[in-house]
Image (cartoon, rainbow, N blue to C red):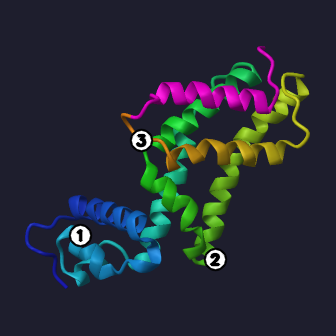
Amino acid sequence: MARTQGSHAETTGPRVRAAALKLFARHGYAAVSMRQIAAEVGVQAGALYLYTPDKQTLLFELMRGHMEDLLADWTPVGGSPVAELETFARHHIRYHLDRPDLVFIAYMELRNLDPENFSVIEELRRAYENRLEGILRAGVERGHFAVPDTKLATLAIIAMLTGVTTWYREGGRLSREKVGDIYWDMVRKAVRAGHA
């Protein structure tokens, strides 16, 4: 099917992904049809296939992009494990608060990925988790943290930090900076971090 008049790949492709993101976050992947995505974009349903082979690919590309951007966006500070952990915690909160719909999809729609796509996303998630676990291990080895199981602590910290997106609202009683301060204090206490 020909493109709708005025439609251009460089603008319509991103609009398709943005529409899918909005609809998946609002209604859930399973409840959204390609026809609904097309209507949101303002093109005929058949035109979507010029930009994506199917709905599964849209979901996968949204999740993969989220994880790849998350991995690329955080840069270790190269300091002590305590400083690295604080940087990680504050970055995680900031990054996720900027992208609540992507975060929701990345965690709630994993079950809807095909096995091959699921494996790719799980590998990216493990790469991110490994960064945090590396910080925790270094802190334990250097005596800065008291953590009996670094893998379990990694999963617990990520779950706690990610949970901010479920309740935080701009303009509420706590600023992003204050939320970051409070969460960092909770993370620090959870690993019984010193001040090195």
Circle 2: element type: helix
What residue is rendered at 24% in x and 59% in y?
10
Residue 46: image location, x then y, percent? 24, 84
Q: Please say if the residues under marks 1 and 3 sit with CB atoms less than 8 Å apart.
A: no
Question: Mark 1, mark 2: which one is toward the viewer?
Answer: 1
**Residue matched to label 1:** 40
Q: Three-letter amino acid code at disc 2?
A: Pro
Crowding at mark 2 (Cα within 10 Å: few <14, some 14-19, many 20+): few
Q: Please say if the residues under marks 1 and 2 sit with CB atoms less than 8 Å apart.
A: no
Please, which residue is most extreme toward the left here? Answer: 5
Q: Nearer the viewer, residue 175 or 191?
A: 175
Which comes before the other along the chain, label 1 or label 2?
1
Quarter of the image with the C terminus is top right
Residue 139: image location, x then y, percent? 82, 27
> Which secondary structure dominates the residues rendered in magenta?
helix
Residue 76: image location, x then y, percent? 63, 29
What residue is rendered at 66% in x and 68% in y?
119
Whole-Å distance between the Cαs marked 1 and 2? 28 Å
Q: Nearer the viewer, residue 151 or 120?
A: 151
Whole-Å distance between the Cαs marked 3 and 2? 34 Å
Circle 1: element type: helix
**Residue matched to label 3:** 169
**Residue matched to label 2:** 115
Q: Three-letter amino acid code at disc 3?
A: Arg
Where is 116 relative to 177, above or below?
A: below
What residue is rendered at 29% in x and 66% in y?
16
Q: Three-letter amino acid code at disc 1?
A: Glu
What residue is rendered at 30% in x and 65% in y?
19
Q: Which mark is residue 28?
A: none
Where is 73 relative to 3, above or below?
A: above
Tell me if residue 27 is in the magenta stretch: no
